[in-house]
Each structure stands twice: as structure tokens, then as C-alpha cells.
Amino acid sequence: MANGEIISGFIAPHPPHLVYGENPPQNEPKSTGGWEQLRWAYERARASIEELKPDVLLVHSPHWITSVGHHFIGVDHLQGRSVDPIFPNLFRFDYSINFDVELSEACCEEGRKAGLVTKMMRNPRFRPDYGTITTLHMIRPQWDIPVVSISANNTPYYLSMEEGLGEMDALGKATREAILKSGKRAVLLASNTLSHWHFHEEPVPPEDMSKEHPKNKIGYDWDMRMIELMRQGRMDEVFQLLPQFIEEAFAEVKSGAFTWMHAAMQYPNLPAQLHGYGTVIGTGNAVVEWNLVKAGLARMAGKAA
Ligand SMILES: [Fe+2]
């Protein structure tokens, strides 16, 4: 079988407000809009997905938490209703998702071989978390591409930052091995917000954009500094600064998806395409793409080391 490829990787944040603002038929609460800058950013990302035509989308979300090991959804199809525990007023979503169980199992096995604790999730009544669903809906609202869903072990919160992110690096490399052996063309989705300082009160209505702005200057300044480095392709510096960014901006990339994705792509020092930036309840969110096809790196990223 031909070598598989990682064709692109995205930071694809998951505030449920974006789904609420868009009013898809699957979401029960209805809005008058809001958070357009980020929703338009996702429109640009969707155009890229449409052009790339991936066989599979792999998503790592901080809100499917498995304290023991890294888990992978191992059932063909899940259908049901997902309610955001923090914003049940905004997100009550009827999902119907097809999973690429073959690639999930391969990721699980490669992770195990790399020394990680891994496990397949086989419960046919399992409810995926709102982070996974929001990221997938915003990047591909047609829901017509099979998915590999990966849990957050949250080791960076329990171990030292270095150990925890080291584990996510190993998970990324294992994911890459599984993809290249699969023969499939894969897109990676790191479901992460950047700065994560947020407001504690919601305006009425929630989509009143006159109340939406960065929670504080330190978070915003950090986001701009990191995005500018990403845009310039200075990813070595991004990763050097990552622990300080996480600490000072309370950044959600701590949960590991960002490190997982870049490890899988072999940390390319490639200028990122910023599809857009915006705040949600004060947190900093960017839709950012590293398109390995456009950069001529997809085959290289897909070759065995
Ligand atoms: Fe989150």
C-alpha cells in the first residue's frame, strides 16, 4: 500500500459559541449571530479542507479527559446529543459521526509500541465531548469525512510540563507512524484555544459583541507574539517559549494537542497561514494552518524515518 501522508495541520479551537453563532440545524439553541471574525476564519479553513480532500480527520480535544492513558474511539458510528456542561444554554447538539476505526486502532497500537498507555473506547453509547464536536463541525460541517478521535490524558497537568509534553510528543510520533502505514491522506486538528483567561459573566444576549474583547493585555500580547512567530515559520522559537506562554497566558495548548500535532508533522519550520483570530468570552482563539501540500512537504512528512 502507498505511503500515507499528513497533508495539513490546523489549530482548530472549540468554543461552543461558534456553533451557537452559526445556527446549524443540529444545535437546539438559536442565536442572532456573533463571533463572525472566527466563523469567517473557519470558512477559510473549510475551503482549504475542500481543496485537500483528506481521507480522514484526526482530532485531539482537551475535553475528553482520560486520566489513565490515551484513548481512541473504536466504534464505527456514534449518534446522540451532546450538551456543553459549562454552556448548556448555547450548545445542545445532535451529532452523527463516522469513525475510522482501522486507523484509530493503528494509532492505539503504535502508541503502545512507543511505551504509552493506550486503549480503544468501545462503548456504543459513548457521548463525544463538545470540544471534539465543535472543532469537527466548524472545520467540516458536512460531516462526511471519517474521524479519529483522541482523548486528552492531561499528563501536562499531572506531571511536570516537560514530562507531560514529552508524552504528547511521543503520541504525535506514534500517530504519524500509523498514518504513513495506513496509505491515507490525513488532516490533523489540534482543538486548542491560545490564551485562556476568560470572563466569568455572560452578557445578555450572549452574542452581544460589544462586550467581547480580550480578557487581559498579557493574554492578548502573548497570542500576538506566538502567532507572529508561527506566521514567520519560527516554530523552534514557538516551542522554546511554549512553557512560558502556557504559564503566563493560561494557554489551553497545555493540554497537549498542539504538541501532538507538530510532533506528528515533524516540527516543520514552516510559515503558518493565519485564517483568523478572535476572542470568545475573552479567550484568544486562532484558526491556523500548516499546509504541508502547499509547502511541498507532504511526501516528506509521510516518509518513514
Ligand atoms: Fe476548551
Image (spheres, rainbow, N blue to C red):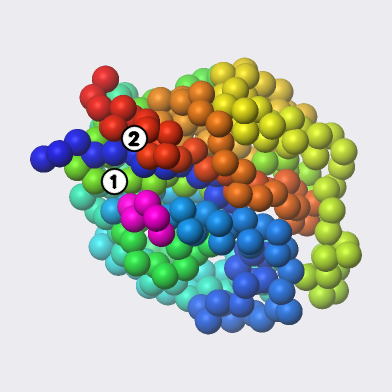
Residue tagged 1: 185
The three-letter amino acid code for the residue at tag 1 is Arg
Left or right: 129 with respect to 284?
Answer: left
Q: Which class describes the residues within 10 Å of circle 2: few (<14), some (14-19), or many (20+)? A: some
* Nearest to the observer: residue 87 or residue 246: 246
Q: Which class describes the residues within 10 Å of circle 1: few (<14), some (14-19), or many (20+)? A: many
Residue at horizontal 47%, vertical 31%?
262
Residue 295 is tagged as none
Residue 117 percent location from the top left of the image: 34, 32
Locate the N terminus and report the quarter of the image it occupies.
top left
Residue 76 percent location from the top left of the image: 26, 62
Residue tagged 2: 298
Residue at horizontal 31%, vertical 42%?
119
Magenta residue span: 50-54
The three-letter amino acid code for the residue at tag 2 is Ala
Check the image and report above or below for 16 versus 111: below
Which of the marked residues, 2 or 1, is nearer the chain's N terminus? 1
> Which secondary structure is most common in the magenta stretch?
helix
User: For residue 195: magenta?
Assistant: no
Left or right: 288 with respect to 295?
Answer: right
Determine the residue located farthest toward the left in the rendered image.
Answer: 1
* Residue 155 visible from this viewpoint: no
